[in-house]
Amino acid sequence: MSGIRQDEETTASQQLSGGARIDRHRHDQDQIVYPSSGAAEVRTEAGCWIAPADRAIWIPAGSWHEHSFYGPTRFHCVGFAPEQSPRRRVPAVIAVGPLLRELIITCSEPGDLPGEESDRMRRVLLDQIGRSPDQQLLLPAAQDDRLRTACRLVEQDLTVNWAIADLGRAAGAGERTLTRLFRTEFAMTYPQWRTQLRLHRAVQLLAAGENVTAVAHQCGWASASAFIDVYRRVLGHTPGDRRGGVRGG
């Protein structure tokens, strides 16, 4: 059985400050990226994915992408030859449990591990990545100019509760047209997309140290309890649990 090839360019661990960025680039290797603290965002032409400390982002080989970081972030990445990687050919956010967390951290910081031991560990890491379910933490990028304008208007201030009819008029599209664009381009309704946007922004703010009540207000929820309910339903735990990081970290 052939060994798993490691690419030093795509395997690393580093401490980054909030607001740090990595400019647009691509790799010949598939890559798993994981913030063991803070939050990491990956943006491509197709959209934007975000991972708090209990999620990781899979980036296929050849994908042009850039990174943004929120809050002090410990950033880990591990690269793999595409022919040896899980069959994910588009970026994806995956859940990170305690075992996957430790595997990513250890493989990103191999240190003096013997080659055979490191090779076995990376095989287990690939197995765990392949079994991890995808998470719905994608903000797709709009292609139609009217939809792009509508999204930009909402993104400017999440405390403004745009009705879709008013949003359509401001973006130069009728209500039916804008409703159709959300469904055809994003496979979401307008309220579903807006909830995704609010959660995306909430992950950023929580990683930067904002408290739950302030995040709920800035992201447009009517109350902290409403925010907590949505966050728990989508991410599986409360935002307070999220701020504590992955258990055992």
Image (cartoon, rainbow, N blue to C red):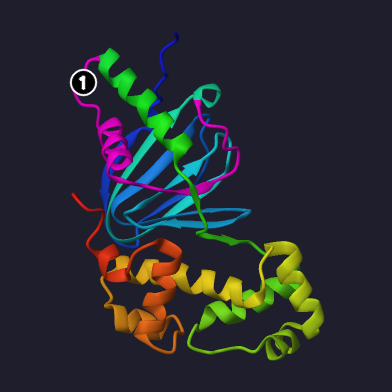
In the image, residue 121 sits, relative to residue 155, either above or below, namely: above
Residue bearing the label numbered 1: 113
Does residue 119 show up? yes
Q: SS class of the residue under badge 1?
A: loop
- Identify the image quadrant of residue 110: top left
- Residues rendered magenta in the picture: 85-114
Q: Is residue 109 magenta?
A: yes
User: Would residue 165 be found to the left or right of residue 98 on screen?
Assistant: right
Residue 87: x, y in percent? Answer: 57, 33
In the image, residue 37 sits, relative to residue 111, either above or below, namely: below
User: Would residue 31 be found to the left or right of residue 44 on screen?
Assistant: left
The 10 Å Cα crowd at callout 1, few under 14, some 14 to 19, many 20 or more, is few
In the image, residue 237 sits, relative to residue 86, either above or below, namely: below
Q: Residue at x 35, y 71 (%)?
A: 205
Which residue appears farthest toward the top when viewing the image? 1
Name the kind of residue labelled 1 in the image: Leu
Residue 158: x, y in percent? Answer: 50, 83
The number of numbered discs placed on residues in the rendered structure image is: 1
